[in-house]
Image: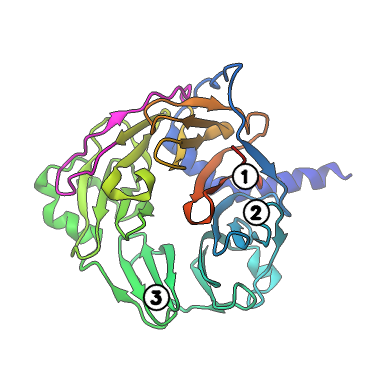
């Protein structure tokens, strides 16, 4: 084995995850001491072998058996057995050299129809469960870069951009209709004296837009100093104070539903949860700190498996589980001996609640309970 090849390979996998890791490190600030797992720590996830070792960004299923996984450096894989085994796939309309230059960040599928987003800006669409793909041209006038896409049925999808635009298509991407009347920039210029601290420093971009099951969105400003909400039917986003001096790292919904509450991870490994329906017109939400001992490691994602069982993942492949709806967490050692960071944890309620956690270096963990 040629050691310089090995070095180069590890360099390549490292560079692939640089963006995610960089965002992660800036959000976490200093990394603390590794939390010591208790002797009785649970082990409820198993690693799944993948045909590549790149950073993974998203996973989605359109049947209990059939799903897709996307990641950096053109990584794209398909499963036909519910995520037990994965095969590498490529897009016929991208040549191999071009494909490696893309970071595929989002995949969304329903009933054999699917959408994939990539960076540099690329949108792909399939109507036949991924056998053939078409490239959807996007207008250069689009405000911001596409950041998420959600498949909503035949020919229908919803896209968001980094400047807070939300668009819906009903004809497979040929036309897009704006759902928000103004960009977040314009909204903040209009109301930034209204007492949302940090809004005047807004750089025009948002990170981590999260959609709930009914189409409401949460967005975090790129500096992590405030957040915004939008619900279908509203003309513009509403900014909110984070209510803490620490920067926001990520946000999401309790059980995927804004009416059940909102969670927020902060740098330094803190997790705050608003356990009831938030007042979307209020400056701040009623957040309570969850009891989770991370030793300073940042938390990147949180997901509810059901009303009581909640999972949090983060730096150094740490995993935590709560059995009381997110009030108290204990350490899970499933990924303890694997190097890297976890970025994403997802459960598929519609498919028997199967769960996956995604990370750097091609790490995919499947929930075994």
Mark in the foreground, 3 or 1: 1
Question: Considering depth in this image, is 368 or 104 the residue closer to the camera?
Answer: 368
Mark 2 closeness class: few <14, some 14–19, many ≥20 residues within 10 Å:
many
Q: Quadrant of residue 169?
A: bottom left
Task: Point out the tag, 2 or 1, that comes first from the N-terminus.
Answer: 2
Where is the N terminus found, in terms of image quarters?
A: top right
Q: Which residue is mark 2?
A: 83
Q: Is residue 328 within the magenta segment?
A: no
Q: Is residue 314 above or below residue 137?
A: above
Task: State the SS at label 1.
Answer: strand
Q: Does residue 122 appear in this view?
A: yes
In the visual, does 195 lie left or right of 123?
left
Residue 176 locus on image (x, y percent): 35, 77
User: Alpha-carbon distance for marks 3 and 1?
Assistant: 39 Å
Q: Does residue 141 appear in this view?
A: no
Q: Residue at x 49, y 28 (%)?
A: 297
Mark 1 closeness class: few <14, some 14–19, many ≥20 residues within 10 Å:
many
Q: Residue furthest front?
A: 352
Region rendered in magenta: 275-296
Q: Which residue is mark 3?
A: 140
Q: Quadrant of residue 129?
A: bottom right
Residue 287 locus on image (x, y percent): 26, 33
Mark 3 closeness class: few <14, some 14–19, many ≥20 residues within 10 Å:
few
Q: Which residue is mark 1?
A: 366
Q: Is residue 315 above or below residue 343?
A: above
Task: State the SS at label 3.
Answer: loop
Residue 119 is labelled as none
């Amino acid at each position: 084995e040629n050691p310089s090849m090995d070095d180069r390979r590890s360099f390549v996998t490292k560079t692939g995850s640089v963006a995610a890791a960089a965002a992660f490190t800036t959000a976490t600030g200093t990394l603390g001491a590794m939390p010591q797992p208790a002797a009785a720590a649970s082990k409820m996830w198993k690693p799944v072998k993948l045909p590549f070792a790149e950073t993974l960004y998203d996973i989605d299923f359109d049947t209990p058996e059939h799903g897709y996984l996307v990641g950096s450096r053109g990584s794209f894989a398909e499963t036909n057995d519910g995520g037990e085994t994965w095969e590498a796939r490529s897009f016929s309309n991208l040549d191999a050299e071009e494909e490696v230059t893309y970071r595929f960040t989002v995949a969304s599928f329903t009933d054999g129809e699917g959408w994939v987003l990539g960076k540099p800006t690329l949108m792909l669409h399939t109507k036949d469960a991924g056998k053939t793909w078409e490239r959807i041209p996007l207008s250069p006038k689009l405000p911001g870069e596409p950041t998420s896409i959600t498949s909503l049925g035949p020919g229908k999808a919803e896209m968001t951009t980094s400047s807070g635009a939300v668009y819906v298509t009903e004809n497979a991407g040929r036309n897009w209709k704006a759902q928000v009347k103004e960009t977040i920039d314009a909204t903040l210029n209009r109301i930034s004296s209204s007492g949302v601290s940090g809004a005047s420093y807004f750089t025009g971009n948002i990170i981590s837009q999260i959609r709930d099951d009914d189409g409401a969105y949460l967005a975090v400003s790129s500096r992590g100093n405030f957040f915004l909400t939008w619900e279908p039917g509203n003309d513009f986003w509403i900014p909110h104070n984070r209510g803490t001096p620490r920067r926001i790292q990520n946000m999401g919904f309790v059980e995927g539903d804004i009416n059940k509450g909102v969670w927020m991870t902060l740098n330094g490994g803190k997790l705050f949860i608003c356990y009831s329906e938030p007042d979307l017109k209020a400056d701040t939400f009623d957040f309570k700190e969850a009891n989770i001992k991370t030793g300073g490691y940042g938390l990147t994602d949180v997901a509810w498996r059901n009303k009581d069982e909640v999972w949090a993942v983060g730096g150094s492949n740490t995993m935590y589980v709560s059995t009381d709806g997110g009030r108290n967490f204990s350490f899970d050692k499933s990924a303890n001996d694997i190097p890297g960071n976890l970025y994403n944890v997802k459960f598929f309620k519609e498919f028997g609640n199967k769960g996956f956690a995604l990370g750097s270096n091609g790490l995919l963990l499947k929930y075994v309970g």
